[in-house]
Amino acid sequence: MSIGRNLERVKERIARACLRVGRDPAEVKLLAVSKTVGCERIKEAIECGQRLFGENYVQEALPKIRELGPGMEWHFIGHLQSNKARHVVGAFQMVQSVDRVSLAQELERRARAADTPVDFLIQVNLAREKTKSGAAVEDLERLLEEVVNLRWGRLRGLMTIPPLGRDPEEARPYFRGLWELRERFRRQVPPPHCLEELSMGMTGDLEVAVEEGATMVRVGTAIFGAR
Ligand SMILES: *Cc1c(COP(=O)(O)O)cnc(C)c1O
């Protein structure tokens, strides 16, 4: 199956899910997750009009971002150590995995030094999985209070990765939970920060995420094949 066909199929899946709940498919961005995928195949996606890509590992991503050149939008979606923040600023337009004040502050320092703002999402660990990063729900309010003071880092919303399940319906409570957190906190987030973006849903459960209000789905396997 060609990458172009795969992209079309994923967009159809998003559109059908939108239709079921009366949403406009234009509200849902498609982040193509290109971890482990070489530049040749990423270029195929670019030729089909895809511009938004997600990567998990700094070392793997930087040469690809350099080779593929300007005009792309890159989101960092993996666990980020604070000492790697300086590599991320300038290369990635958004960091989706901010889960602690110290990381947000390091991004702020590096963004100011580079004279380049960086957008970010707060990753929330709704299922309290020990193996996953993400802020605990009870820490979210304090984290929000801190990050809205940043000037170079701009909060844009929330991200979550639900526990791996067999049935996509198992993810629904977590997606709904993220939506509810946004409703609860959005009035406490002053401009230029906001909580508009909800990054949730992957290959196996993107329909459920769209039904629950995702503004961005992160899809790797359904576009580039199994890793
Ligand atoms: C790998 C990855 C994805 C994509 O997963 P698929 O199941 O291949 O679509 C999405 N989000 C994150 C954070 C990932 O690490």
Image (cartoon, helix red, strand yellow):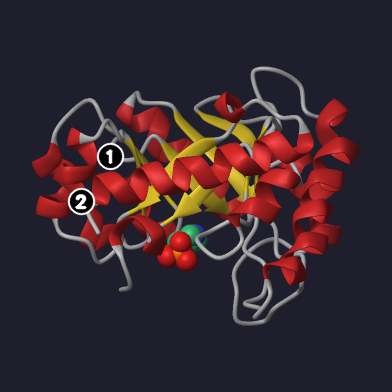
Q: Which residue is mark 1?
A: 91
**Label 2: few (<14), some or many (≥20) within 10 Å?**
some
Q: Is residue 123 visible?
A: no
Residue 103, image x, y percentages: 53, 52
Q: How many marks?
A: 2
In this view, the residue in front, 200 or 209, is: 209
Q: Amino acid at mark 1?
A: Ala
Please tell me which residue is depicted at 34% across the width and 51% down the height of the picture. Answer: 6
Q: Which residue is mark 2?
A: 62
Please tell me which residue is depicted at 65% across the width and 57% down the height of the picture. Answer: 160
Which image quadrant for residue 170? bottom right
Q: Amino acid at mark 2?
A: Leu
Which image quadrant for residue 114? top left
Furthest-top residue in view? 191
**Image side of residue 107 versus residue 122, left or right:** left
Which numbered disc flags the more N-terminal residue, 1 or 2?
A: 2
Q: Secondary structure at mark 1?
A: loop
